[in-house]
Image: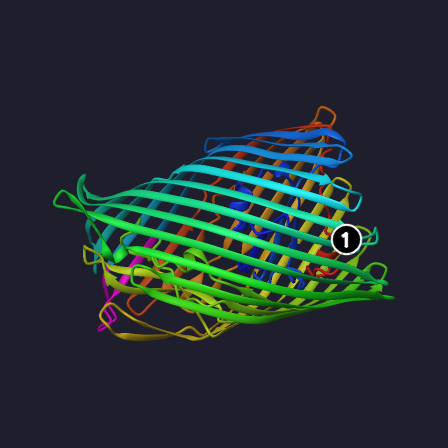
Amino acid sequence: MRGNESVRVLIDGKPSGMASNIADALKMLSSESIEQVEIITNPSARYEAEGGAGIINIILKKGSNQGVNGSVTANVSNPFGYSVGANINYKEEKFNLFANLGYRNDFTKGNSLNETEYIDQNTGLSKSFVNEYSKRERKRKGYNANFGFEYYLTDKLTWNNNFTWRRSDGDNPNDVNYDYYDAGRNLLYSNRRYTAEDDFKENVDYSTDFTYKFNDKGHQLFVSGTVSKNFDREDSDISTSNAGTVLTSDLTNSRENELRNILRLDYVLPIGEGQFEAGYLGNFNELNTKYNVTTLENGEYIENEQFKNNLEYLEKVNALYAQYGNKYKKFSYMVGLRWEASEIDVNQLVTNDYNKKKYNNFFPSAFLNYELTDSSTASISYSKRVRRPRGWSLNPISNYSSSINFYRGNPDLDPSFTDAFDLGFMKRWYKLTLNTSVYYNRTTDATQFIRIVDGVNEEGIPITISSPINLNTEYRYGLEFNVNYNPFKWWRLNGNINLFQEQTRGDYTYTDTEGNSITQNFDNDTFTWSSRVASTVNLPGGIDWQTTFMYRGPRNTAQGKILGEPNLNLAFSKDIWKDKATIALNVQDVFNSRKMRSEIYLDTANSYSERQWRERTINLSFTYRFNQKKAEKPGRNGNEENGGEEYM
């Protein structure tokens, strides 16, 4: 997605409570339950306008073979964890029953560090140093079950139902050590802050839909409804100690309840060689987040009013769209228009701060393809997208595990709107396919994460706060190359390089704890790049060996810079028992190098930080298939080869 994290994740074409981001979605799904993953960098008007960088759609398997078929997969990993999953399908002439079941017992490790130099604004000299080192473990037991059936009521009418339930329990201890130094880097003292956190998550989805096919030429009507309910609880016991003596003790508890209802209608009408589509989408979301901290004082836990939070987020989005596509000789095109009416309430119930925002926006899209030859295609496309802030981006209080580095959401965040232009070219040779594109994105009210130093903790140490804000405008333009090369039958290569320039423009004004109004300029110009190379080799003995190397280049920010991030993964697999079973071994982050590293330069502090969300993991899996062929590794489809445009 070209290094842009503003991505909308769908499952079977619909939003899901588990799919707020691609990582969370894939954690809960076994690879054998996934039919394919669609990546659309420039979606048409048919899709939600949400997601400035595009859409990732995960399509789950629904078996096509008659009778009973499916697969079972078991995994074991290091750090020690294990999982088992199954997808089962039973198909007859009039109906199709399917289920995806799974259990996971995961254990992963992560770490972070923040080394901060505090500066005297009057003299510009160092006045103190604090080094913060953190080690975190995540132990999680999770269940997921997905049941569905398709019933062919008539030759033209199909009824589909899908029920999903997911539940997980986690234990997430976090150990933070602080070293405090004076201006001459002499160690003054060291403290330890230990957080014992447990969490519980549960998600229930139910969807039902009807498809009526007027004929076998594509004329059809689709109607669906989805209800999703999510609950998330996190409780923590936090103690700060020095040389074994407890200095402070805090309890935190967080509760999050979400209810989402979705209504959808799509109509498709072929007209000659072309096709007309129109539809409606209603997306209604209610999210309530409560957070509370109590501190031990004189043997009694007292509520800390500074961290008390009760945030209510209400979202209503009604959308209509229409689009038309056709083909004339070597030209194919599609134009569309989507209208979305958004009504959003962000209410802080503790302080009685109520914010209502209404938006009525049009989202046009246009796609044009031209077949230069039988093996080459040129394309140009445009679409308008939106990114609405949600959840932790809006929540003012979310974590208390560190006493000097806080994350604070911004309830006043506005949506970001992106105009995306793409000019693509695709060429196929005998063993080589080249897909390249030039793109330009302009985003208004772009979201930027900033750091400020404001206030002090109970020990008098300055507090660094990270928070999202809206800037005036962000410009991103770049050049991307995708290459597929098969030098030999036993060797396949796939590579990608994305070169882009990013410009941000805007000022931010805030009031600090002493009542001073401070304005900072965040104008910034930076060039960066990212790349990915994947090599698949068929070794003797029927063993497939895949190596994937990814690298995110360094880039400057308005407050410092983000350093380069390399990552190497290895995987081996072998089919046995006449391709009815597969054994696979993979190593994620071979050199433990996948760390987000950054340097921040402020008037009052300079800092260097590292964060590794997950350390190296090794996974061994076994999959057995019954009455089911091994899924072929899909090649790049025509849409993706034309720069990710959605036109057929």
Outermost residue toward the front in this view? 153
Quadrant of the rendered structure where residue 367 is? bottom right
Q: What range is drawn magenta here?
A: 114-128
Rendered residue at 64%/36% (across/down): 32
- Helix or strand or loop: what does disc 1 sit on? strand
Quadrant where the image shows the N terminus: bottom right
Q: Is residue 15 above or below residue 501?
A: above
Q: Position of residue 115 (x, y in %)?
A: 32, 55
Is residue 607 or residue 619 the one in the foreground?
619
Residue 139 appearing in the image? no
Q: Which residue is mark 1?
A: 432
Q: Is residue 149 left or right of residue 81?
A: right
On whether residue 578 falls in the magenta region, the answer is: no
Q: Position of residue 583 (x, y in %)?
A: 63, 29
Outermost residue toward the top in this view? 577
Is residue 53 or residue 112 the one in the foreground?
53
Is residue 427 or residue 407 the one in the foreground?
407
Q: Position of residue 393 (x, y in %)?
A: 42, 59
On whether residue 121 falls in the magenta region, the answer is: yes
Which residue type carries mark 1? Leu
Q: Is residue 40 left or right of residue 359?
A: right
Residue 150 appearing in the image? yes
